[in-house]
Amino acid sequence: MIPNYVVLEVVLKEKFIGKGSKNLSELEGVINAQCAKGFRLHTITTANGGSKGFGGGDRLQATLVFESV
């Protein structure tokens, strides 16, 4: 039986210099993989995951909820 909803979490790593995320392609891959399985993105939320120290940049936790179509 296919579940009605799937919840996944992706950690986005901020660049140390400049703006933006270093791994948006990972987020895109997670979304495309679920779409290929017959799910659509229902909700996405982010929360500050803190910093991993000098040179590591900040972390954002993206929680994605997919629903079956």
Image (cartoon, rainbow, N blue to C red):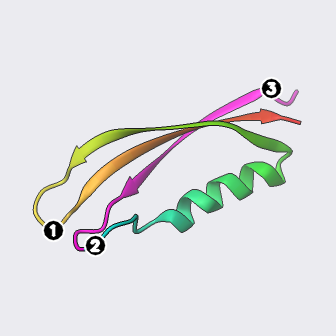
Front residue (pair 15, 19): 19
Amino acid type for the residue under numbered disc 1: Gly
Query: Is label 2 in contact with label 3 (beta carbons under 8 Å)?
Result: no
Which of the two discs, 2 and 3, labels the residue nearer the N terminus?
Answer: 3
Question: What residue is drawn where x is 79% and y is 27%?
Answer: 3
Which numbered disc, 1 or 2, marks the residue that appears first in the sequence?
2
Magenta part of the protein: which range?
1-17
Residue type, label 3: Asn
Number of numbered discs: 3
Q: Which residue is drawn at 67% across and 53% down?
A: 31
Query: Rounded to the nearest whole Å, what is the CA distance between mark 2 and mark 3?
Result: 39 Å
Q: Which labelled disc corresponds to residue 4?
A: 3
Which quarter of the figure has residue 29?
bottom right
Residue 33 in which image quadrant: bottom right
Residue 28 at x, y percent in the picture: 62, 61
Q: Which amino acid does label 2 sit on?
A: Gly
- Relative to 53, 42 lies left or right: right
Q: At which x and y percent is residue 38?
A: 86, 45
Q: How crowded is mark 2: few (under 14 residues within 10 Å), some or many (20 or more)?
A: few
Q: Name the residue under label 2.
A: 18
Q: Residue at x 69, y 33 (%)?
A: 6
Contact check, label 1 and label 2, Cβ < 8 Å: no
Q: Distance between the residues labelled 3 and 1?
A: 40 Å
The residue where tag 1 is placed is 55
Quadrant housing the C terminus: top right
Residue that protrudes farthest toward the front in the picture: 19
The residue carrying pointer 3 sits among few (fewer than 14), some (14 to 19) or many (20 or more) residues within 10 Å by Cα, namely few
The x, y position of residue 18, in whole percent, is 28, 73
